[in-house]
Image (spheres, helix red, strand yellow):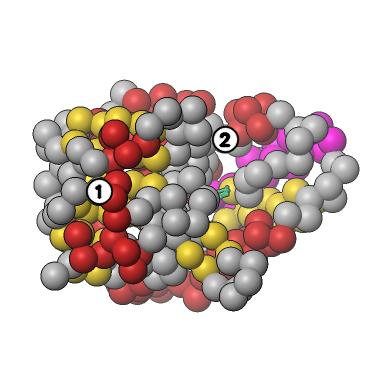
Amino acid sequence: MYKLIDGKKVAESIRNKIKDEINSLDTKPGLAVVLIGNDPSSKVYVNLKYKKCMEVGIESYKYELSEDSSEDDVIELITKLNDDKKINGILVQMPLPKHINRNNVLKAVDVSKDVDGFNPESIGNLILNKQGLYPCTPVGIIKLIDHYNIDVKGKEVVVIGNSIIVGNPISQLLLNRMATVTVCHIETKDLSLYTKKADIIISAVGKKNLVTKDMVKEGVIIFDVGINKDKEDGKIYGDVDFEQVKDLCSYITPVPGGIGPMTIACLLENTLIAYKNQGKDK
Ligand code: GUN
């Protein structure tokens, strides 16, 4: 019988801890959330992040720029936020409009306020296994691994997806813990060749039913990062065919209620860490 990894519950307990800690502070941490353009999913995520900030006592400031804003406009706003004392964390929602160079924007975010962990220096800290602000979804997965006492050392981990948001940083975090990590992606010829051997599968692709029963071994642990809205029934599905695969798993995350709430809880935690690193609680 598989065990469900209850991200919703773990995230709630993280949020409660953050809320208690913020209650005892003299000033409130501030998070700036920057949204550029009209991506409907991004709007939903940004609004959710804004709402969850308010619930734990983080002051959230929303900055919405139009789709045709220039890269200079975006960098000018970020520079202002870097200098703004009431802002402790800055998040630029991805994806950006095509004409804006993502790396230039991410480089502009002050490393001490980089609550998404996408600045090159933050990525360097992750690779060097140094303290720093790390990307929220991967940190959320690690927190679930720790909460459920899952040992990753020496385990065969297959990560599906090589994005800078999830696939790359979770691979590095697991490498830092001495897992044997294989990263599969869009050009991988035979995905099941890798997934069949995996003790742990982390899928972050955005494709419903990508992982099926015939692709996994018995006892596998699955973290499903996919958020796929089905056009027909309007429901949210992961990358893994949950119903088909669950009975082969020892642990599996549901979608929704698995990784999603952990991402936001870790963003709130990163904002509080940034606030404290900036000496604002002294
Ligand atoms: N787009 C999808 N996931 C994320 C995330 O964690 N952070 C940001 N900034 N954009 C995203």
- Residue 77 picture quarter: top right
Q: Is residue 86 magenta?
A: yes
Identified at 24% across, 41% down, the residue is 196
Q: Main secondary structure of the magenta part?
A: helix
Residue 235 point in image, percent of width and height? 55, 73
Q: Which residues are magenta?
A: 70-90
Q: In terms of depth relative to the viewer, which is nearer, 245 or 92?
A: 245
* Label 1 residue SS: loop
Q: Nearer the viewer, mark 1 or mark 2?
A: 1
Q: Which residue is mark 1?
A: 216
Identified at 49% across, 41% down, the residue is 165
Quarter holding the N terminus is bottom left
Q: Amino acid at mark 2?
A: Asp
Position of 39 compared to 140: left or right? Answer: right
Residue 264 point in image, percent of width and height? 46, 61
Identified at 12% across, 47% down, the residue is 151
* Residue 33 visible in the picture: yes
Q: How many marks?
A: 2
Q: Which residue is mark 2?
A: 110
Q: Is residue 91 magenta?
A: no
**Vertical arrangement, residue 261 with respect to residue 99, above or below:** below
Q: Earlier in the sequence, mark 1 or mark 2?
A: 2
Residue 282 point in image, percent of width and height? 39, 53
Q: Amino acid at mark 1?
A: Val
Identified at 26% across, 57% down, the residue is 144
Query: Which residue in the rendered view is the most extreme toward the right?
Result: 68
